[in-house]
Image (cartoon, rainbow, N blue to C red):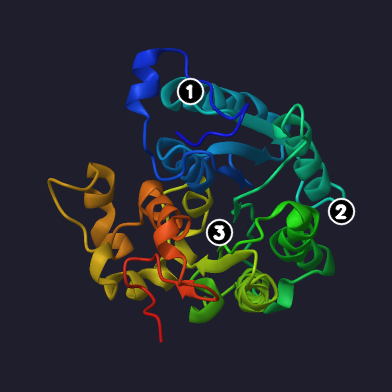
Amino acid sequence: MSFRPGYQRASSTNLKAAVAERPLDGKLAVITGGSRGIGAAIARNLASKGASLILGYTSDSSAEPTAKLASSLESSHGISVLAVQADMGNSNGPAHLISSAKNHFSHPRSGKFQIDIIVNNAGVAMNMPLEEIKADEFHRQYTINVLGPILLLQAALPYLPTDRSGRIVNLSSVSASLGFVGQTIYGGTKAALEAMTRTWARELAERATVNSINPGPVATDMYGGTSLEFQNHIKPFMQNAPLERVRPGIDEDRFVRDAERAGGRPAYDYEIAGVVAMLCSEDSGWCTGSVVCANGGMRFSP
């Protein structure tokens, strides 16, 4: 197997046999917003494929669930997981995340340290009509959703591969292109992230591929916290998304019951994680600068 020293924590011969020859063995992945929802689902997927992980989280309330997730992934998959509290909305947060990872994962003798995968998942949203927008909320969302990924890439740049094997995946949203009411700020942040994806694909071409994905509604706390007014606004979009049509007997009962009102079902977090994992694979090496649709057909690629 190709684990780097210190990255594997297999506790038995049986576990080592069970995890042999996985596609991301020996890789190290940084996932921001890795404590719950889509971020946790991405962590589970990449861990199952052999990647060791750095899970970034922000709030004190996320410390315990992140620690539990890290312990579970280590014991289940024979990898190493480091949970780091780092606020992507603080100018020092991204650098702290990378320096903590370097201190933990550097080779004990050579000092070698490489980050193979970065998933910019952390983000915030708040819907409000144009006339209610305040400068403070504008700066909050743009700092976390746009400046945070910039600062994280700057901090990670010295440690990216030099052979194009790196993988960077940015979590955008259909909000960048569908013009949902109340999303002047949030939609703008995600459009900026998509523009940055294309620029980074050129600037980092010899280091890593850089792609975005654009989920629609996902069954997470963020979507659950949106207003009924907003959900009614996006209902026609869900009705026209071919894969969001509910499937009685297959989909969760709560989504089947709610489908007539909502117009369909949201994505499950593991469905989004699967698309991210695809873009982190060796097989995705000829794809860069793209926004890969991960929204059940709510938004088709042009």
Q: Give the mark, 2 or 3, whose residue is nearer the N terminus.
A: 2
Q: CA distance from mark 2 to mark 1?
A: 31 Å
Q: Amino acid at mark 2?
A: Ser
For the N terminus, the image quarter is top left
Q: Quadrant of residue 284?
A: bottom left
Q: Residue lying at the far right in this picture: please name it.
A: 92
Q: Of the numbered discs in the image, which one, if any, rests on residue 127?
A: none
Q: Is residue 232 shown above or below 40?
A: below
At label 2, counting other C-alpha atoms closer than 10 Å, the crowd grade (few under 14, some 14-19, many 20 or more) is some
Q: Name the residue beneath numbered marker 3.
A: 165
For the C terminus, the image quarter is bottom left
State the SS at label 3: loop
Report the side of 163 relative to 215 (left or right): right
State the SS at label 2: loop
At label 1, counting other C-alpha atoms closer than 10 Å, the crowd grade (few under 14, some 14-19, many 20 or more) is some
State the SS at label 1: helix
> Residue at 22% across / 48% down in the picture?
251
Contact between marks 2 and 3 (CB within 8 A): the answer is no
The image position of residue 11, as x and y in percent, is 47, 13
Q: Give the mark, 2 or 1, whose residue is nearer the N terminus.
A: 1
Please tell me whether mark 2 or mark 3 is closer to you in this view: 3
- Closest to the observer, 33 or 108: 108
Q: Residue lying at the far top in this picture: please name it.
A: 12
At label 3, counting other C-alpha atoms closer than 10 Å, the crowd grade (few under 14, some 14-19, many 20 or more) is some
Q: Is residue 179 visible?
A: no
Q: Give the mark, 3 or 1, whose residue is nearer the N terminus.
A: 1
Q: Name the residue beneath numbered marker 1.
A: 72
- Closest to the observer, 120 or 251: 120
Q: CA distance from mark 3 to mark 1?
A: 28 Å
> Residue at 21% across / 58% down in the picture?
246
Q: Name the residue beneath numbered marker 2.
A: 91
